Image (cartoon, grey):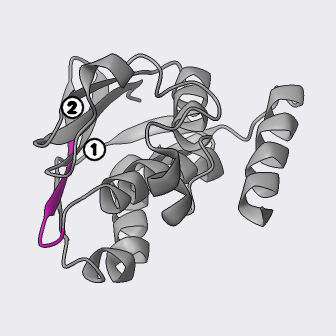
Amino acid sequence: MSKLTSEMLMIARNEQDEQHLMEKLDFGLLSELVIEELQTKAQEKNIEITLQKQDDLFMNGDQTLILRMMMNLITNAINYGKINGHIHVILKVENDQIVGEVKDDGIGISEEHLDRIWERFYRIDKSRSRENGGTGLGLSMVRWIVNLHNGTIHVESIEGIGTSFIFRFPKI
């Protein structure tokens, strides 16, 4: 309940406050920090997280929000990943954009749910989400953060095979 309250407060505050601290961020370094923070959680399921990144991954952004976005994506990959699985975080530059991917070999998402995962409180399997501590707000928040930073995000998934979240941000 406290996690839900915290996430709702964050959303409400951010929707009312259009001013965010936009500063030059090293997206690669922020991603490294998130991966380091989540290693223990991944090790509980013997999931290996790898990071493949190019240099010069700088963008203008709100550090707290970008960290939250990456935490949500990688935490989901762990929660819905399989034991002894893998998560690959790939960051590169393409046409003056930072292109990122968080890819797992977990349970995947059936096609019928792909468009709805971005909705607030939408959970595919409510019992499994509660087990993992999910509130149904994580991906809604991710999309909002990406949009705030003039980026795009989409998902590709095959049930039983895995999921990839691919995002793009303007590079500076």
- Residue identifier under label 1: 56
- Work out whether residue 128 or residue 38 is closer to the camera in this orientation and state it: 128
- Badge 1 crowding class, 10 Å Cα cut-off, few under 14, some 14 to 19, many 20 or more, is some
Q: Residue at x 86, y 39 (%)?
A: 13
Query: Which label lies toward us, 2 or 1?
Result: 2
Q: Write the start and end of the magenta stretch as one range.
A: 83-91
Left or right: 136 as drawn, with respect to 162: right
- Work out whether residue 23 or residue 155 is closer to the camera in this orientation and state it: 155
Seen in the picture, residue 109 relative to 160 is either above or below; the reply is above
**At which x and y percent is residue 39?**
33, 77
- Rendered image: mark on residue 37: none
Three-letter code for the amino acid on which mark 1 is drawn: Asp
Q: Residue at x 23, y 36 (%)?
A: 164
**At which x and y percent is residue 114?**
35, 22
Please state, as top left, top right, bottom left or bottom right, where the C terminus lies in the image: top left
Q: Residue at x 79, y 44 (%)?
A: 8
Q: Residue furthest front?
A: 127
SS label for mark 2: strand
Q: Residue at x 73, y 41 (%)?
A: 21
Q: Are marks 2 and 1 in contact (CB under 8 Å)?
A: yes
- Residue identifier under label 2: 93
- Badge 2 crowding class, 10 Å Cα cut-off, few under 14, some 14 to 19, many 20 or more, is some
Left or right: 2 as drawn, with respect to 90: right
SS label for mark 1: loop
